[in-house]
Image (cartoon, rainbow, N blue to C red):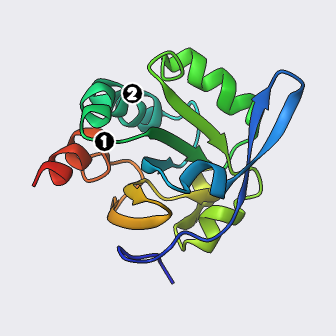
Amino acid sequence: MTIQPGDKLPSATFLQIGAAGPEPVASADVFKGKRVALFGLPGAYTGTCSTLHVPSFMRVAPALRDAGVDAIVCVSVNDPFVMKAWGEATGGADAGLTFLADADGGFIKSIGLDFTAPPSGLIGRSQRFAALVDDGEVKILNVEPSAGECNLSAGETLLAQMAA
C-alpha cells in the first residue's frame, strides 16, 4: 500500500558517505522534529533525474528554506558512493541538498513507491515523487504517473503547494 498524506514514515536506515566511508543514517535523524522536502527518483545519473528533478529542487532551495523547510533530501535506490558523486556532479550537494542511498530499496518498498522496469535496467527502484514531511508525517505527496515525467514531483510544484 502506498503511503498517503497523514501517514507517518516508517523507520529506515539510509547510507551516506562520511569521513570514514559509508555511514548509516537513521530515518529518525532525518525527519524527527524537522520539516523536510523529500524527493525520490529512479536513479542517479539517469536523464530526467539529472536534468529536471534535482535541478528543480536546486532552483527552489532558498525559497523552501524561507518557507520553513529544514532539509531537502533526495533518496534513490543506489549505493552511497554513487549518491555522493552524483550530488557533487549535479551541484546539488553545493546547493545544500542531502543525497541518501536506500541501498537495498527497503525504505522505498516500505512506503509503497517501488517499481521495476526491466527494459530500462531499473530493478526495484523508486517511483518519482516529492513530499513534504513534518516530524515524520507526510503532509503533501506527489507521485508522477510515469518515471520519465517531472511535473508533479518538481520542486516548484511542492513549493507552490506549501504556499497554497
Circle 2 Cα neighbour tier, 10 Å, few/some/many (<14 / 14–19 / ≥20): few
Q: Residue at x 29, y 36 (%)?
A: 64
Q: Nearer the viewer, mark 1 or mark 2?
A: 1
**Label number found at residue 51:** 2
Q: Which residue is mark 1?
A: 68
User: Looking at the image, is mark 1 or mark 2 earlier in the sequence?
Assistant: 2
Disc 1, SS? loop
User: Which SS class for mark 2?
Assistant: helix
Q: Residue at x 29, y 43 (%)?
A: 154
Q: Which quarter of the figure has residue 55?
A: top left
In the image shown, does 137 or 106 lie closer to the viewer? 137
Query: Hey, what amino acid is under mark 1?
Result: Gly
Q: Is residue 75 above or below residue 127?
A: above
On residue 106, the disc is: none
Q: Could you tell me which residue is drawn at 56 percent across and 65 percent down? A: 115
Q: Residues within 10 Å of mark 1 (few under 14, many from 20)?
A: few
Q: Residue furthest left?
A: 164
Q: Quadrant of residue 109?
A: bottom right
Amino acid carrying mark 2 in the image? Thr
x and y, in percent, of residue 146 in the image = 36, 58
Let me know if residue 123 appears in the view: no
Query: Which image quadrant for residue 67?
Result: top left
